[in-house]
Image (spheres, grey):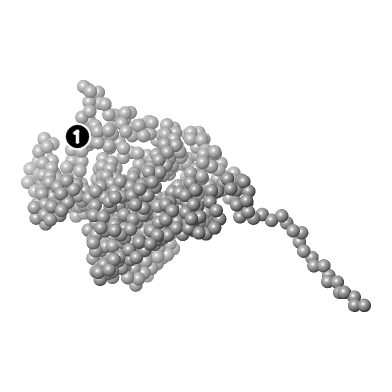
Amino acid sequence: MVEEKKEPKKFSLPKLPSFSFKDFRLKTQVGKSMFRHGYSDDEKDRAMTVLTNVFFHLHPVRVRKSGARFGFTWCAGGLSFFVFLTLVVSGILLMFYYRPTVEYAYNDIVAMREHVPFGIMRELHRWGAHAMIITVWLHMFRVFMTGSYKPPREFNWVVGVILLVLTMLLSFTGYLLPWDQLAMWAITVGSNMARATPFFGHEGPGAALLMLGDIPLVHAGSDVRFALLGGRFVGAAALLRFYILHCVAIPVAVVILMAVHFWRIRKDGGISAPL
Amino acid sequence: MIEVFKEAVNQFSSPVAIFTTGILLLALFVALPALMTSPLVAGAIGLLTVAFFIFGYFDPHFGEMVARPDNIPIVGLIFIFGFFTWYAMRKAVLNDALIAAGKPPKEKEESEEKVMVFPYLIYIEFVVALLYAAGLVFWSLLIKAPLEDPANPALSPNPSKAPWYFLGLQEMLVYFDPWLAGVLFPTIIIVGLCAIPYIDNDPKTSGYYCFRQRRWGITAFLGGFWLLWILLILMGTFLRGPNWNFFGPFEEWNLHKVVPLVNVNLSEYFYLKWLGIGLPKNWFLRELPGFTGLAAYFWVIPTLLEKTVFKKLQERMGTARYHILILLALLMLALPIKMYLRWAFNLKYLVAIPEFFFNI
């Protein structure tokens, strides 16, 4: 009698229910409803990946190989858009805790700093704003150095210049919101320039010519600086105006112009290449 | 030894010395692009800059200035744009050599070929965005966003500075009145940038890095960007202290530094110094020398150039384009010209009509 040697039973972990993303994608109704393309690596499927995804669809299905190079574009435009998105997200979170009034603004910022351990939303927003200015300048620099502003892309360059100005205005209006000494005096210095606007600023050349009899039409209470600040100095009204410009008015303009800018890249023949 | 070096740097530093050095460097860069962008020379310049900042970091004043949280992006700016200026010009130089040899630029090889956006481009974008986001998060974790004392309209800090990206404009205030530095020049910069593709509209040189075929355009752009924008921002940030006085990089900001105000108007030069008679009462007569100068600058120069040196250019571009180009170029040059007039002759205003706030 040969006793069969029983192998000692190996210990094995109980089998966990496995989740296959591929099966979810291709076999369930939920997965199939989300994505409208297959899961293979052929060209048709890759084309469908771009065509059926609203975010990827900013791109065409194919691009010139030269234009897809990091060394050609430096990704500066794309990064400007990306950092804009991070600024929107961090900005929305900041808006939950911030009230744009002289009584509360500064204290809300202090509270954010004191009460949120390891909080970095304000840092992300502030450094992101600096970074966005740098990437936008870098993008303009790259587009110039490759001559990509030339026909047929002239108009998109103009849209880009306006976006560049709006980027700086976004940062400028946000600069006031912490309502500390740096904020108030930087905006005071910046907005003082508006006083000197020809004809429309009360210390600008030509403003003194705009008289109705003896009454000056353009004075400290009616010039462009007053319109910008909502007062004769940087005060409560300026804080509210800058808040609304920063959080609503300029972002809306930027989003619309970005849509035009991205759309025009494709309509003007994609990322530029030698003729 | 170190103190001697710092003292020498401080002594050398002045707006005129720094600006002139900038012009010379740029001139060298565009005159000898192949040499200046060679890895050896460019690397040496880069290393020297890094070494200067590391050295300066241990100086109490310089160290405090560059490590100030809001100044970090401005230090970064020097290196980011320094690197990418080199990178773009290096590619341009290599392409120039190819074109000179009768070959198409390097981008041409790959521009006929197309790649699928997914995954090739999306992959690059994803990786770059990830690195960028990681960089931002690290930056935010390392350095707290500063917060100063609550806003106090009664207590103005000295110096009061605009946000850093507008400091070039604030620096221009030294040389021009606010209606020019703060209103007209920004407007002209924006309009001028928008006008670029309508002035320089030859599509043959688009889509690749090159320098020789676009020598004047790129030189003007680099001059405007580096000298009239970035350099002024750097000066405004790091070298302008209380009362907007100029300080060397290693010089403590002394609140009581006395700078004599000796600036003289052109009308005073003309009537008092040269003719030896009093200033005329009538403002138009008084400012006639200034008006004449401006008219010569903006009207005679373009017309003369049109008839002589730029004859071919004018024919090629057409009258409207030519005159817009020359006007924008003259306006751009007006800034350094006024700066040098100030440094050389203490000239305050070319035209000064305080009656109408109209000073140039």
Judge whether residue B339 can be spotted in this image.
Answer: no
Asked whether A169 or B291 is in front, the reply is: A169
Where is residue A136 shown, x and y percent of the image?
38, 51
Q: Amino acid at mark 1?
A: Glu
Q: Residue at x 31, y 68 (%)?
A: B94
- Helix, strand or loop at label 1? It is helix
Which quadrant holds the C terminus of chain A? bottom left
Compared with B286, B261 (above or below) is: below
Residue B46 in view in this figure:
yes
Classify residue A146 by image quadrant: bottom left
Q: What residue is rendered at 54% in x and 39% in y?
A: A97
Side (left or right) of B322 relative to A62:
left
Taking A138 as reference, is A161 above or below it? Answer: above
How crowded pointer 1 is (Cα within 10 Å; few <14, some 14-19, many 20+) is rated as few
Would residue A220 appear left or right of B296 to someone viewing this image? right
Q: Residue B193 at what x, y percent from top left?
A: 28, 48
Indicate left or right for B142 with A129 as reference. right
> Residue at the spot x=34%, y=32% of the render?
A226
Residue at the extreme top of the image, as rendered: A213
Please determine whether, in this image, residue A192 is positioned above or below residue B105: above
Whole-percent x and y of residue A68?
41, 59
Please provide percent x and percent y for residue B260.
Answer: 25, 50
From this viewpoint, which residue is outermost toward the bottom?
Answer: A1
Q: Residue at x 34, y 52 (%)?
A: A269
Q: Could you say which quadrant of the image residue B218 lies in?
A: bottom left
Q: Quadrant of residue B183?
A: top left
Label 1 belongs to which residue? B355
Indicate the chain on which mark 1 is placed. B
Q: Nearer the viewer, residue B188 or B199?
A: B199
